[in-house]
Image (tube, grey):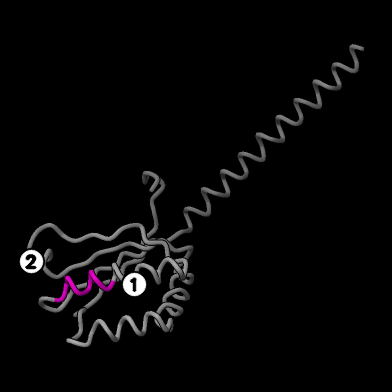
């Protein structure tokens, strides 16, 4: 009886240790995967008077295409002070890697829905003067997003 009890207790201890080890391995893998992610900071500088049209294009078309193509937008921002407040749209997209970003952007620019939305939006002139792009990785001391 005592031996059976000890065997059961040892099995339980082994199962608990295996569970804790697998939890640690999964957490470590998740941390490693999140460290590999890259964030793409995009700053659009519009032509004079075109910021509202650019916002409309993002609101009505671009954002929905991003979602459909698996492009995860963290957020969109508008600066609060002039002159940037009058002509700047800023956003961040999360990607698995820079190669993933490149592939998704290629798919995006070839998307027929995007092509139509783009052509329609520029019928009265180009909206965007220039775009700044920066790829970033989170630091180990960053808070969770």
Q: Does the magenta stretch include residue 131?
A: no
Number of numbered discs: 2
Q: Position of residue 138 (x, y in %)?
A: 39, 53
Identify the residue at image location x=69%, y=35%.
19
Identify the residue at image location x=16%, y=60%.
79
For mark 2, what is the residue?
Answer: 83
Q: Position of residue 123 (x, y in %)?
A: 22, 87
The furthest residue to the left: 82
Label 1 crowd bin: few (<14), some (14–19), many (20+), radius 10 Å: some
Quadrant hosting residue 1 = top right
Task: Give the residues drawn in magenta, as a range.
Answer: 50-57
For mark 1, what is the residue?
Answer: 62
Q: Relative to residue 67, is residue 23 depicted above or below?
A: above
What is the spatial separation of the Cα atoms under label 1 and label 2, in whole angstroms?
25 Å
Q: Relative to residue 13, is residue 71 depicted above or below?
A: below
Which one is nearer the viewer's eye here, 63 or 5? Answer: 63
Of discs 1 and 2, which sits in the foreground?
1
- Do the residues bearing badges 1 and 2 touch, measured as CB atoms within 8 Å? no
Quadrant hosting residue 105 = bottom left
Q: Where is residue 81 in the image (x, y as percent from the top left)?
A: 9, 59
Q: Relative to residue 56, is residue 35 depicted above or below?
A: above
The furthest residue to the top: 2
Identify the residue at image location x=45%, y=73%.
104
Q: Position of residue 75 (x, y in %)?
A: 31, 58
């Amino acid at each position: 009886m005592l031996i059976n009890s000890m065997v059961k207790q040892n099995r339980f201890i082994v199962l608990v240790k295996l569970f804790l080890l697998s939890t640690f391995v999964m957490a470590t893998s998740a941390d490693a995967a999140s460290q590999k992610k890259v964030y793409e900071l995009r700053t659009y500088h519009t032509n004079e008077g075109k910021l509202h049209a650019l916002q409309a294009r993002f609101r009505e078309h671009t954002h929905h295409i991003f979602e459909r193509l698996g492009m995860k937008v963290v957020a969109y921002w508008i600066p609060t002070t002039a002159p940037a407040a009058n002509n700047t749209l800023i956003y961040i997209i999360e990607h698995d890697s820079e190669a993933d970003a490149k592939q998704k952007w290629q798919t995006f620019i070839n998307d027929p829905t995007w092509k139509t939305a783009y052509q329609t939006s520029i019928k009265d002139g180009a909206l965007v003067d220039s775009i700044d792009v920066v790829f970033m990785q989170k630091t180990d001391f960053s808070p969770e997003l």
